[in-house]
Amino acid sequence: MPSSCPICEQPIAQTAAHCSVCGFPTGLAIEGLRSLDLPSAEEPSAGPNGGAAVAALAADPRPSPEAELNATISRSLREKMEVLRDLGRGAPDVTNELCEAALSEAEGRVAQALDILRSAQQRLETQTDEVVARRVTALEERRLALQKAGVRFAIGGDLDHLREAVEGGEREEAAVRLVEAERRLGQFESDWKGLQGLLAQIEGLRSEAAELGIPLGEISGELETIREKLGAPDLSEEVLDTLAQDAAQTLMLLHEAIPTSLESELAAHEKRLDQFPEDHAPSAAARRLHVEATRHLKKGRLSEAVQSVRELRRQLEELEKEAAESAGAPAAVTAPVETEEQTLERLLRKARSLAARVRTLPPDSESAREAAIQIREATEHLRARELAEADLTLSRLMRVLAYEEPR
């Protein structure tokens, strides 16, 4: 059995019935090799001129003109398919025809092999034109969709060169330009969607901050500048990348400005809530909202924190309105002033009670970890005789634990 295929010259195993590349039968390859050494039934054998005829055939092994043309067309088709392979899914393929032509030629039907190759050549050209035309139309539609969305991608030059290649019949050149144009447009669309996501986050946070009256400085101006630059007539990938970086920077500034304002406001609201007794039922909803807003803020959930603060404002306004309406009621009896030792003893009892409450929480929960941190802070304040700070920390912890379910 031959070690290589006589058609594609690829190595073939000794036990293989066909070439793994072109499918040429190895049995035919053996017969082809034998024909080089033995005269066929139609050739002259022994005799005065028989040996000379065989010698003449052996001395002139040149292929026929049809065989040479077949080889040329086959090589051209393989080269074109190699270029068109970058088109990916739907790329024209005439591999089956190449294998069929190789088998026909190996069996001596050279003319039939030529017909097969010419048919394959025509089909490859027709399908290439169809695929390129269809995908060029899709490119135009995608570019128009971007324009309707308010962005004009600078890809017009690439599309013009692509059309010139198509109109000039330069199929391989058109395929190469088409693949590059699709790559550029696909990357631009992906970056554009990412930028739109950033702008949506900025717009949402800015609107929520504006409702709360949070000062944003020049952030609103930065957003308008980005939108103005997006309306440029020819937007390149580099400019879009720069605008995405500017948007990310603006979003980061928002994430710095909003928490600072919310922390200050929550501290002020905490003082307002401290004016009500711990067992004051009407203020329970406001205390719960204060805890929720604080947690959202610590976790970086700015939208949720803003919503909680907005609702907290409304609850406090109602509480203060009710307090004003009941101003004519008899004033509560003023509690006697505590000495420092009495205050310290009271706070220690309060800390021990809260520590026992913390131990009832799930040990691996985030609430348990935060509560333990606050207990340690209160203890350090007590050791330093910072009684006001310790009282504030313990009161804050008490409000948090009031809405936690024990395990």
Image: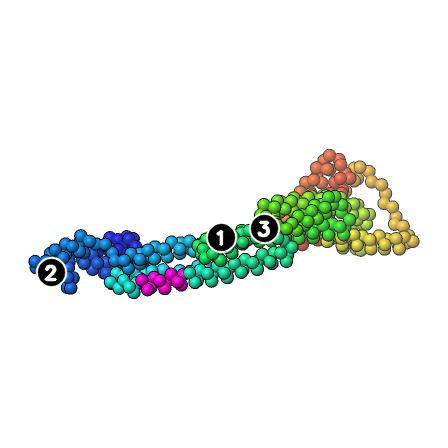
Q: Position of residue 86 (x, y in %)?
A: 44, 54
Look at the numbered disc 1 and give the secondary structure of its residue: helix
Crowding at label 3, few (<14), some or many (≥20) Cα neighbours within 10 Å?
some
Q: Position of residue 289 (x, y in %)?
A: 74, 53
Relative to residue 364, is residue 66 drawn left or right?
left
**Within the magenta stretch, is there residue 216?**
no
- Residue under label 1: 177
Relative to residue 295, is residue 74 drawn left or right?
left
Residue furthest out toward the top: 384
Task: Give the residue displayed 32% in from the left and 61% down from the top.
Answer: 99
Residue 175 visible in the picture: no
Identified by mark 2, the residue type is: Ser
45 or 179: which is nearer to us?
A: 45
**Quadrant hosting residue 44:** bottom left
Tell me the magenta residue range. 114-124
Q: CA distance from mark 2 to mark 1?
A: 60 Å
Q: CA distance from mark 2 to mark 3?
A: 75 Å
* Residue 154, numbered label: 3
Task: Give the residue displayed 63% in from the left and 53% down from the top.
Answer: 151
Residue 146 visible in the picture: yes
Crowding at label 2, few (<14), some or many (≥20) Cα neighbours within 10 Å?
some
